[in-house]
Image (cartoon, grey):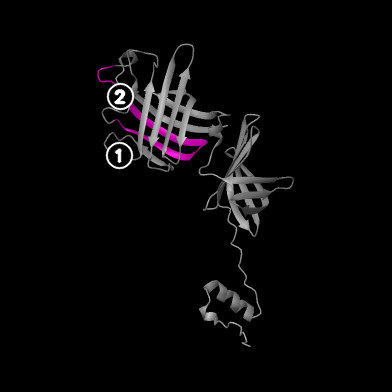
Amino acid sequence: MATTRPLRTHPSRLGPLVFIWWLAAACGGESVVAPAPSNPEGIWQSTRVGLSESTLRLANDGSFTRVVADLAGSGCESAAGTWRVEGETLRIQVSTVNNEPASAAESYPFSLEGGRLRLDGSSSTEEFSRISSMVSCVDYGFGSWTGLLRAEVDGAPIDFAAIAVRVDVGGGTVEIEGLYSNEFDDRRLVLRVDGSPGPLEPGLFTVQNVPRATDTFYGLYHPEPGSVMFSGFDTTRLLPPGSFTLGAISAERVVATFSFRGNPRVEGEVGPGGATFVEIAAGRIELTYR
């Protein structure tokens, strides 16, 4: 009667995974895979439909930004500061709230699972999903731009109300429109800087009416916005001097100084009283979205 012998296979002839298992068993041990370190870097958002929305940006340079929108109450709060990870704890140091100085330390045990970030607070747990871009309180439209927009127009100081501020930090542009109005007259001021391709950073922007110019500044002043006979003064003709010094910029804050000479936008036109130019000096901007 034939005897069946067990099949003997040399480990070197096995597949790579089987060989690793055989080697671990032969040594009396078990294979161990170390867990990947948790890194919450990125932009995260948590939404309670119709109630609130919280967006968190943890940048790779250690900076932190948070926007919490009260959708039910039409309110919004922004905060900024720094962040770091200690083990499985996310630590946040808040330095500004609504663009005003503040100081607060926050700690959250956190976990990352299935592309979601979970933060465990003292009274509740919040789960965030990753998104592609950060939002600001301006995006929700619950507030308004407040602060200082002032300039001397031919030597006379005028305070303008900021009626429109369009900031695109990533795209490298900011535009500010101001209006002075009383029972006798209206006056309009428009300031625009272009640092594209961006991002927009503090620095000097000048009037440069030449092709392919970079870091440019445009200014317009209209003493009679409703006039059909006069188009206003601006910096598009005759290469007038003008500069805009950006001191601070964010989606919710603009600080700058400016000055420029404006010539008639349309050749041959003259302003009120026969004026052929306007001098805008000592311009100041300190605007915050609240």
- Is residue 144 in view from this perspective? yes
Residue at x 58% of width, y 56% of height? 39
The residue pinned by badge 1 equals 213
The residue pinned by badge 2 equals 263
Q: Residue furthest right?
A: 123
Q: Is 229 situated above or below 31?
A: above
Disc 1 residue type (three-letter): Ala
Q: Is 81 situated above or below 188?
A: below
Magenta extent: 240-269
Measured as percent of width and height from the top left, residue 94 is found at 62, 46
Disc 2 residue type (three-letter): Asn
Image quadrant where residue 124 sits: top right
Residue placed most toward the observer, 282 or 38: 38
Q: Secondary structure at mark 2?
A: strand
Measured as percent of width and height from the top left, residue 132 is found at 51, 44
Residue at x 66% of width, y 53% of height? 110
Our reading of the magenta stretch's main secondary structure is strand
Q: CA distance from mark 1 to mark 2?
A: 20 Å
